[in-house]
Amino acid sequence: MAASASRSEVTGGHTGYGRVLPSLLFAHSGTDVDHEALMTLRRQLEWYFSDASLSTDHFLHCKISEAAPDGWLCCFWLMCCSRIKELRATPHQIIDSLKHSHLETKVVLKPEDGGKSNDLMRRVFVRRRQPLPPLLPAECRGADGAIVGCPERAVLVDRHGTMNRLKDQSRVQKSLGLKEVGDSTTVFREQLRGGGSSAKNKKTASASARGDARGPVIAVGYERVLYGDHGPYIELSPEQVHWEAWPHFFDKSRYADSYYDEFYTRASHRIWQVQWDRWDPNPFDGVLMLYSQRHTVDDRPWAPGSSWTEGRPNGYADYRPGYFYVAADESILEATFHGEAAVFNRGGRPDWAGG
């Protein structure tokens, strides 16, 4: 579609999901749609555009590749997906559901539409801002949506040099048990040094086994695990952060090249202070920090120490201003899975993970 022959409006969410409701979820669409229903639709769409899904979804991977370099996917293809059909979602509801998502939406109207269109299914577009993941055989995705095996050994094509992100995802899934698409119930705690809590199988570890060594709750729920060229980070909204756990704040606005401010817990600030006072060459090593993002890194094509020579047109990672990030590192935090059993269907597959 030629740019000169169309008018577009781009919106993006540069702002947990509950159990998937019956197929009549959006059947009686009015001006107001249930918040839980929109969140369910949002999580489903975010799953379709996730690295975990696209790495083995050959059809959508191909469609987005065909739309390069901008990567806008026509809503028509999304509405052909079985889960979206079950939800009976409309293009309007897809736009509404993604208002606070990291995914961007665009409406393109042709002059003959007269400013409106009855065929929004072919006028609404959705995209992710980061490059596509490598393409893997379908069997590399497990029943729970997680990547299985060693992705670098099974890769079919990696046009954008993003294998490092899939390898990070495989590690995070094994060590923290975190899915790429977030939820509203996962509890994050600080991993206290010497606490004796295993980094393995965090979601099923019992509270009694950890006893008094457990650290404070630092967040409940998360938006996503963001995979970029500088490692994996857990993205949090302000409402998901447990602010009482972060009493130490470092305002970095006076630094011209700073993209974020920093928060520390009581324990992590003590560790940082000790390492700083003894002139440790890396005083931030092993320190839990909450990064308060002030700017995107759109103007930073290369991550610090990146080996990808071509650079990223939209920056080395999709950090969003107004959101908060902690490193997805099992040595500094643990994740406990709570109250999500209802979202799994009979096959053991999350309702947003597939179709």
Image (spheres, rainbow, N blue to C red):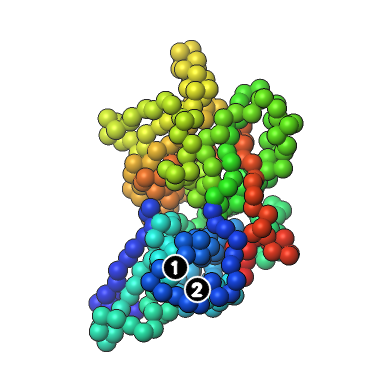
Is 351 located above or below residue 328 in the figure? below
For the point 33% across and 75% down, the residue is 108
Determine whether the residue tagged by mark 2 lies in a helix, strand or loop: loop
**Picture coordinates of residue 19 (x, y %)?**
60, 61
Q: Which quadrant does the N terminus fall into? A: bottom left
* Residue 15 seen in the figure: yes
Front-lying residue, 155 or 329: 329
- Locate residue 108 relative to residue 26 in the image: left or right: left
Q: Earlier in the sequence, mark 1 or mark 2?
A: 2
Q: Is 278 displayed left or right of 112 in the figure?
A: right
Which x, y percent locates residue 54? 57, 63
Residue 29: percent from left, percent from top? 44, 75
Taking the image as shown, residue 326 lies to the left or right of residue 119, namely right
Secondary structure under badge 1? loop
Quadrant into which the C terminus falls: bottom right
Percent position (x, y) of residue 288? 52, 30
Q: Residues within 10 Å of mark 1 (few under 14, many from 20)?
A: some
The numbered mark at residue 26 is: 2
Whether residue 167 is situated above or below residue 12 in the rendered picture = above
Q: Which residue lies most toward the bottom here? A: 112
Which residue is the site of mark 1?
A: 33
Q: Say if mark 1 contacts mark 2, CB within 8 Å.
A: yes
Q: How many other residues sit within 10 Å of disc 2, few (<14), some (14-19) or many (≥20)?
A: many
Name which residue lies at 34% across and 41% down.
294
